[in-house]
Image: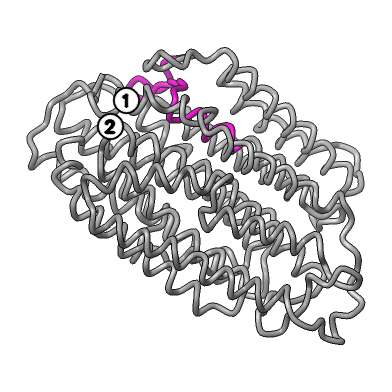
């Protein structure tokens, strides 16, 4: 069943890319929607069969592949990876649905999105370090082309910058994995056997250093963040949804799975510095967001701030904080996807994302009142208002981290307060006030265009009211990660 999550989108991508009869773009979009819907259904079926009380890898599949270098096709699922697999399937469906019915080079476009889904799912499911690296690198290729071909005016620059940064990230991660196998004398890259090896603290510090820089680039954490705002601004709306909602989680997943899971002693030794870095990154992201005039850049910098909360929670290394870090991944994935979707609607209808050029879009007769209402709800969720998933995730992060690292936690709390500041500045300028004459006759937004936003908002509220639906997945796994069992 886990192989199906990888093989189905890959085969679907091949079929769409080489479909023998020329069809309109809407045909390939529909085909991609069907495939993505099937992936969501398959993910839910796997979820219903998952044993929440079992900390071990489930649905395991281990097939020898290239035995000479110790590589095996070893897949498995646990409470850390399943929530992310679900987010990947859900946001892939939403991104395809939100794509234009007349997108240029549609066969190539939808094939790349499905290959991207394959790479991300494979990375989350891989139980072999080298296999993880292969999938970790695979997702770079489709995302590069998705930005470089269907992006904005500076798409070439943004795509190349993304490629260079993420390639360096992969090289550093691979260097850490190769060093681990060499120092332990292991004959394979299998994850669980490598966890059982005991290394000295100095060796662990030597190996964790390149791994941390690699995943910090991917998350991204200040000062390795500069590729992200450019990539978001130039990427189309559906690709921004995938980039913020899914791709960044590869970094935080690698942080928990490998930095904490393989080098726990070194991680605990470095944790105070990691917590300080999280506080700095949160404040930096929030401060930069306040200064932005492009709505998309505001959301991009908010991602830098909110992803830092995951680093803070991971640094505390308690059962509650590790559980909170997984919850924050899910929360950020849903909320950032919603905000990017709505910014995309504003840009599509007005032709601009400049905060200084937009006024009064909440006007009920001639503006974008539904978009404005949804945007306000999305901002409330990102600011951590009760009743939504953002409040639960941030409360768990701060509750789990404060007893261990009070000062960094307070810095992140200030970052949360600044979230309300920069988003309220955007809401006040863009949606309130007198509608300008240049925006007086905007095209109406059809309900089908808002369908993805309503779907995301449903999950945001549902998980905010019933957080146990997410928390139960990672509680047992958090204990296993910290105890080495």
Measure the alpha-carbon separation of dots 1 and 2. 9 Å
Splitting the image into 4 quarters, where does residue 268 fall? top left
Q: Which mark is residue 480?
A: none
Please give the range of residues in magenta. 60-88
For the C terminus, give its image quadrant: top left
For the N terminus, give its image quadrant: top right
Say which of 232 and 447 sits in front.
Answer: 447
Name the residue carrying label 2. Answer: 261
Q: Is residue 116 above or below residue 320?
A: below
Indicate the secondary structure of the residue bearing disc 2.
Answer: helix
Residue 326 in sight from this viewpoint: yes
Asked if residue 3 lies left or right of residue 100, the reply is left
Q: Is label 1 in contact with label 2 (beta carbons under 8 Å)?
A: yes
Residue reaching furthest to the front:
386
Residue 167 in sight from this viewpoint: no
Whether residue 82 appears in magenta in the rendering, the answer is yes
Whether residue 227 appears in magenta in the rendering, the answer is no
Measured from the top left, where is residue 24 in percent x and y?
Answer: 91, 48
Measured from the top left, where is residue 332 in percent x and y?
Answer: 52, 49
Measured from the top left, where is residue 236 in percent x and y?
Answer: 68, 61
Q: Few, some or many C-alpha atoms within 10 Å of disc 2 (few <14, some 14-19, many ≥20)?
A: many
Name the residue carrying label 1. Answer: 191
Measured from the top left, where is residue 98 in percent x and y?
Answer: 77, 51
Say which of 69 and 358 sits in front.
Answer: 358
Q: Residue at x 81, y 58 (%)?
A: 104
């Amino acid at each position: 069943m886990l192989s199906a999550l990888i093989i189905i989108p890959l085969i679907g991508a091949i079929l769409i890319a080489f479909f023998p009869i020329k069809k309109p773009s809407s045909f390939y979009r529909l085909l991609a929607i069907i495939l993505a819907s099937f992936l969501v259904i398959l993910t839910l079926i796997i979820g219903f069969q998952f044993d929440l009380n079992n900390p071990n890898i489930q649905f395991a599949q281990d097939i020898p592949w290239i035995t000479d270098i110790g590589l095996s096709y070893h897949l498995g699922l646990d409470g850390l990876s399943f929530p992310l697999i679900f987010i990947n399937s859900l946001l892939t469906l939403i991104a395809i649905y939100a794509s234009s019915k007349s997108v240029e080079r549609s066969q190539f476009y939808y094939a790349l999105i499905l290959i991207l889904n394959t790479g991300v799912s494979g990375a989350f499911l891989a139980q072999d370090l080298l296999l993880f690296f292969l999938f970790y690198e695979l997702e770079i290729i489709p995302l590069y082309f998705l930005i470089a071909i269907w992006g904005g005016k500076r798409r070439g620059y943004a795509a190349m910058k993304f490629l260079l940064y993420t390639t360096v990230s992969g090289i550093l991660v691979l260097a850490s994995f190769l060093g681990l196998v060499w120092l332990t004398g292991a004959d394979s890259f299998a994850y669980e056997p490598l966890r059982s090896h005991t290394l000295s603290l100095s060796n662990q510090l030597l190996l964790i250093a390149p791994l941390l820089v690699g995943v910090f680039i991917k998350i991204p954490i200040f000062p390795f963040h500069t590729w992200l705002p450019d990539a978001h601004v130039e990427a189309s709306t559906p690709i921004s949804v995938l980039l913020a909602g899914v791709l960044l989680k590869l970094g935080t997943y690698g942080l928990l799975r490998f930095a904490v899971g393989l080098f726990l002693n070194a991680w605990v030794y470095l944790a105070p510095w990691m917590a300080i870095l999280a506080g700095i990154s949160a404040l930096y992201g929030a401060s930069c967001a306040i200064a932005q005039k492009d709505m998309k850049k505001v959301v991009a910098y908010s991602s830098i701030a909110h992803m830092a909360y995951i680093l803070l929670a991971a640094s505390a290394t308690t059962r509650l904080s590790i559980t909170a870090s997984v919850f924050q991944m899910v929360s950020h994935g849903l909320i950032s996807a919603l905000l990017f979707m709505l910014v995309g609607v504003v840009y599509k209808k007005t032709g601009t994302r400049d905060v200084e050029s937009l006024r009064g879009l909440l006007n009920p007769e001639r503006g974008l009142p539904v978009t404005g209402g949804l945007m306000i709800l999305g901002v409330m969720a990102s600011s951590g208002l009760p009743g939504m998933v953002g409040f639960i995730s941030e409360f768990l992060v701060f509750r789990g981290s404060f007893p261990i690292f009070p000062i960094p936690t307070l810095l992140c709390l200030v970052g949360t307060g600044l979230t309300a500041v920069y988003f309220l500045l955007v809401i006040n300028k863009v949606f309130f006030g007198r509608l300008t004459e240049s925006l007086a006759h905007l095209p109406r937004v059809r309900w089908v265009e808002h369908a993805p936003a309503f779907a995301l908002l449903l999950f945001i509220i549902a998980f905010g009211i019933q957080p146990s639906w997410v928390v139960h997945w990672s509680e047992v796994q958090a204990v296993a990660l910290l105890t080495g069992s």
